[in-house]
Image (tube, helix red, strand yellow):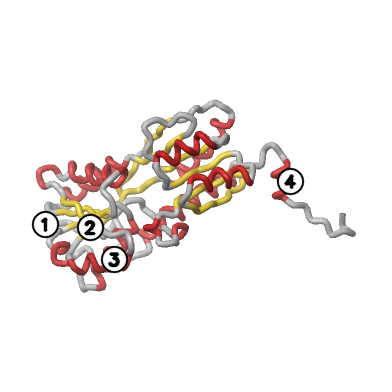
Amino acid sequence: MEQKQYIPSMAGILLAQNNSRIVGVAVHDHEKYEGRVLTDPFIASALNDLCVELEKAGYFLMVKVTREWKEISRFASMWNMEGMVIIGFCEQDYVSLRDNMRIPFIVYDGYLKEAKRLCNLVVDHYDGGRQMGMFFREMGHERVLCISDNDTCMDEERFLGFRDAMGEYGADFMLIPMEREERREFYRNRLQEIQSYSAVFAVSDYYAVDLMQFLQENAIRVPEDISVAGFDDSPLCRFIHPMLTTIKQDGHRRARLAVRLLQEMKEQRESGRNITLPVELVKRNSVKHIL
């Protein structure tokens, strides 16, 4: 072996075995990411947490970015995967995958009426919005706005929880463009309207930080002139000024649960279900108290 300078192929060895120890992660390359889905703070954090937990359990991680569910099943078969984690697709895609893949898979934040033969790990979106609405009220805010690029599924739940917690004051909703340049132009055209609110709740940290940057570029101070908060508690929140108030998803907990459930599904000790994980308000200095 030394004379022939033989180097064993780990991939070949794993593929030749019944247990490859490979878990795949498929991420939907949605147009809103503009070709940079893996740099999105939420996606990047989720991948990091999964990588840590899978390595602890003795698995290898492989990542696939695609818009087509059929590519996921081909990807899984090509590498003889033991399981998958799938992020960002729609209910019909998950159903099609379940009908076309033999391996177990975990869904992050799917909208599923029933989850037979797959596990769907969602966070409590409504409660996250509710917690933020309660906090805004405690801080004296009465005229508030929620921004999102859509009004369905998880974003709708976040808004409804937020609006309900605001009680008699209510909350307005603003649908914003997905693409950054279009969004900036949208903000410029509605700057006076946005300034009429004392606080804005963005349904993601990405949109919250993007709005903060736009406001600051236009000499509008956060939180002195307008408060801003987000959702996810991505690392981005702690590296901006002011640091962002947000709703925390426990990514480490979800990753640990995903790995455990994949193992249980493979051993047929878990048949699939929807599981809701709690969220937590993180108070930082992007929201001011109104006296």
Of all residues, the one furthest to the right in this rendering is 3
Residue denoted by label 1: 291
Is tag 2's residue or tag 4's residue first in the polypeptide sequence?
A: 4
Is tag 2's residue or tag 3's residue first in the polypeptide sequence?
A: 3
Residue denoted by label 4: 13
Residue denoted by label 3: 182
Viewer-nearest of discs 2 and 1: 2
| In-front residue for pair 43/231 | 43
Q: Are there few (<14), some (14-19), or many (20+) residues within 10 Å of tag 2?
A: many
**Which of the labelled discs sits on residue 287, or is there none?**
2
Amino acid on which the number 3 mark rests in the picture: Glu
Residue plotted at (32% across, 51% down):
231
Residue 58 seen: no
Q: Are there few (<14), some (14-19), or many (20+) residues within 10 Å of tag 3?
A: few
Q: Position of residue 8 (x, y in %)?
A: 77, 52
**Circles 2, 1 touching at the beta carbon (< 8 Å):** no
Amino acid on which the number 4 mark rests in the picture: Ile
Q: Tag 3, which secondary structure?
A: helix
Q: Position of residue 227 (x, y in %)?
A: 21, 59
**Circles 2, 3 touching at the beta carbon (< 8 Å):** no
Viewer-nearest of discs 1 and 3: 3
Is tag 1's residue or tag 3's residue first in the polypeptide sequence?
A: 3
The answer for how far apart the CA atoms under marks 1 and 3 are is 36 Å
